[in-house]
Amino acid sequence: MILTCPSCESKYLVDAKQIGNGRHVKCTRCNHTWYYESNDFDIKELETQKELQSSKAKEYKTNPQSNLPVVYENKTNFPLPFLLLVVVAISVLGYMIIESIEFDSEALKQCMNQSIDKIIIWLKDFIETLLET
């Protein structure tokens, strides 16, 4: 059976069993997706060769030389514009908070130095306990 992309007229040689009664397919050339409905497919023949078809389906999925168009799958991803909007909103909010707060840089420096000293002491104690055991 030959499938033809309705968008770019690319042709694909496909086994009728892969399509069945119908299937969503995606053109590998132009990425157009469409539903191909096969009226010539025999359901009884499918039932008799079900086991054979399942082993062939695995073979077709792993075979990069297959002429079958890519199966269309919906992927739920966050849209990029939404993520960009969130990043910009957080940046603006952070800027507004920083501008509205008056902070003492010397106090911040002391707080950071104390935190670093505590982390160094904790790491030193941790390493000593590892070496003792």
Image (cartoon, rainbow, N blue to C red):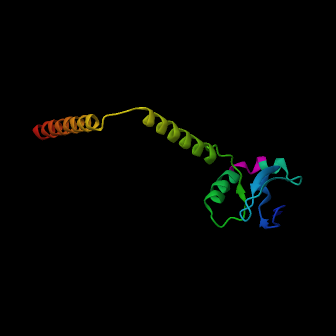
The quadrant in which residue 12 appears is bottom right
Q: Where is residue 56 in the image (x, y as percent from the top left)?
A: 67, 56
Instruction: Spot the residue most to the right.
Output: 39
Residue 1, visible in the rendered structure = no
Q: Does residue 41 lie above or below 92 as drawn?
A: below
The x and y percentages for residue 45 are: 81, 51
> At 47% across and 39% down in the image, what residue appears?
95
Q: Nearer the viewer, residue 61 or 55?
A: 61
Q: In this view, does 108 lie to the left or right of 82?
A: left
Quadrant containing the C terminus in the rendered view:
top left
- Provide residue 131's location: percent of width, then percent of height: 12, 41
Q: Give the range drawn in magenta.
A: 47-51
Q: Is residue 43 left or right of residue 79?
A: right
Near-viewer residue (85 or 32): 85
Q: Which image quarter is the N terminus in?
A: bottom right
The residue lying at 26 percent from left, 34 percent from top is 107
Q: Is residue 17 magenta?
A: no
50 inside magenta stretch: yes
Q: In this view, does 99 lie to the left or right of 32?
A: left
Q: Quadrant of residue 33?
A: bottom right
Residue placed furthest toward the top? 101
Q: Majority secondary structure of the magenta segment?
A: helix
Rendered location of residue 61, percent (x, y): 64, 57
On screen, 70 above or below 99?
below
Which residue is drawn at the image coordinates 79% and 67% (left, top)? 10
Vertical arrangement, residue 107 with respect to residue 12, above or below? above
